[in-house]
Amino acid sequence: MKEQKINKNLKIYRRADKNTAYYYAAIKSSTQKNKYYRLSTNETNARKATAVAKRMELDIHRKETVGAIVNEKTFSFIAKQYAIHVQHRIEKGFAKKIEAEYVRCVEDKFVPFFGNYLFTALNQHHVEEYASQRKKQISRTRQQTEQAAWNALQKFAVNNNYSNKQIDFIKVAVSEAKQRLDFTRQQQQTIRRALEKKKSTISKRAKTNELSELLRDYYYLLLHSAIRVGYEFMRVRYTSFEYKSVSELDKSQQQFFAEVGMSEYLVCHLRSGETKTSKSRTVIIRTNSQAFENALLSIASRTQHSADIYEKHLSKNKLKTYPQKVACLKELFATCDEYVLRLRSDENVNDLSDAEQQKRMTRLSENTSKAFNQLLKENDLYEDAVGNKRSLYSIRHTYATELLEQTSNLVLVAEQIGNSTLVLDKFYNKARATTKADAFVGVAEQIAYDAKSTKSETKSAIERMRALLKEMEGDL
């Protein structure tokens, strides 16, 4: 790099790493320590480049004196620098998990609209235009994410002297939060049949076949656990599971989760930083039907490393009995540190970088969700009568609903779901009409008992309550 020093705050040079004959100016900031502005003079002659550089120096120092922005950059340029900044913070362990979501929001939502604007030229009117171009209302959660991402980008721009002001994000009307739909027993049967049919249908595309066989197992894993769809389940490994003694549970948990005569129960340890809330939690798995364990073995039978352990046990005893299956799973849990959710062709997954691993998980999560939505559409289960939609996440609500139908212990269920009892009651509590009727009948019985009513009065109160609930059943 050929360099010529003009004064203590200015030098010109030619860049050896660029195929250009132009001189660049390096101008030291008069207000920020160790800050240099590097700009092309667009001159190939040293004397002319020096003259241009001096004018640049005066202009920059004048702008710094009055607090003006020295370098005008486009929104897309600053968004790119922000993404690099967040990635460095993530690699060093400084960033929160949500910051990666902010970057995705900036890149997917803001850059397509604001990308070509000069950042300093943005004003409140532009933000209003962005908000008004939406075709439908967004959820409150999405609005909060967009607002947080916008504020983070604005703060980054000010801190790095790309802007000297912050523009407020526009709050718009959001859609009302609704109870997400779940699946009835009959609908679950329809889904099971559809999944088996899809798995047995051979496609010309190998990836489609792999996705179909994984989707079937993924469905059973979700239906019998409170592990969240997507990122949370994508991070689960075989080593996340453990069989524990039933005697360690309290009486309410023994009654709720344990089969009569069972001495062990299955749990999944979700690690800190790998859950939606970033807090670790232990989830108890429902194993009464063995569907969850069979799904684990099914995936293990066709994926790298885990298949070796599976084949060893299969050749030994054909894995016909439940104890034989448990023995195979225990070895998987103890020795196979592989992610559970993998396609048949996914090999050496643990050797991928964090960025490549994230891309793989995101792609797999999106593909399984799309495939399940398509299956629901094909079986007329995607929407209800008023247009509310079901998705892969509806399986989680099915799990929560079935637990709530079996126990009144909201705290116990909330611990498994990983939500507060308030959120659980607001969004997950969809007990069936018959269950609600029984609950109301119980209330009527208690009222009658407390009032020391006669048997005939109690019977009359119960009959009136049942008649009332029958009329209300359609609304429930």
Image: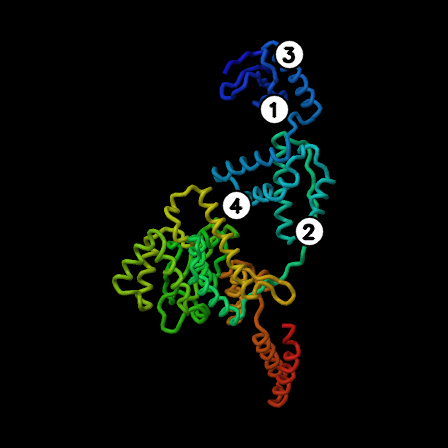
The residue labelled by disc 1 is 32
Q: Residue at x 53, y 13 (%)?
A: 3
Residue type, label 2: Lys
Q: Residue 407 bears which disc, if any?
A: none
Residue under circle 3?
A: 51
Q: Left or right: where does residue 173 sit relative to residue 242?
A: right
Q: Which mark is residue 135?
A: 2
Q: Nearer the viewer, mark 3 or mark 1?
A: 3
Quick check: marks 3 and 2 in contact, CB under 8 Å?
no
Q: Nearer the viewer, mark 4 or mark 1?
A: 4
Q: Point out the image quarter for the C terminus.
A: bottom right
* SS for callout 3: helix
> Which label's residue is closer to the chain start, 2 or 1?
1
Which amino acid type is marked by label 4?
Answer: Lys
Quick check: marks 2 and 1 in contact, CB under 8 Å? Answer: no
Residues packed near mark 2 inside 10 Å, few (<14), some (14 to 19) or many (20 plus): few
Give the spatial CA distance, label 3 vs label 4. Answer: 49 Å
From the top left corner, tell me how far across and down residue 337 is, in percent: 36, 51
Say whether disc 3 or disc 2 marks the residue closer to the N-terminus: 3
Q: Residue at x 58, y 21 (%)?
A: 38
How much space separates mark 3 and mark 1, taking CA atoms? 24 Å
Q: Quadrant of residue 66?
A: top right
- Which residue is disc 4 drawn over? 97
| View extreme (right): residue | 125
- Residue 423 in picture, x, y percent from top left: 59, 60
- Please name which of the two marks, 2 or 1, marks the residue nearer to the observer: 2
Whichever of labels 4 and 2 marks the residue nearer the N terminus, that label is 4
- Vertically, is 257 above or below 308? below
Residue at left 57%, top 76%? Answer: 434
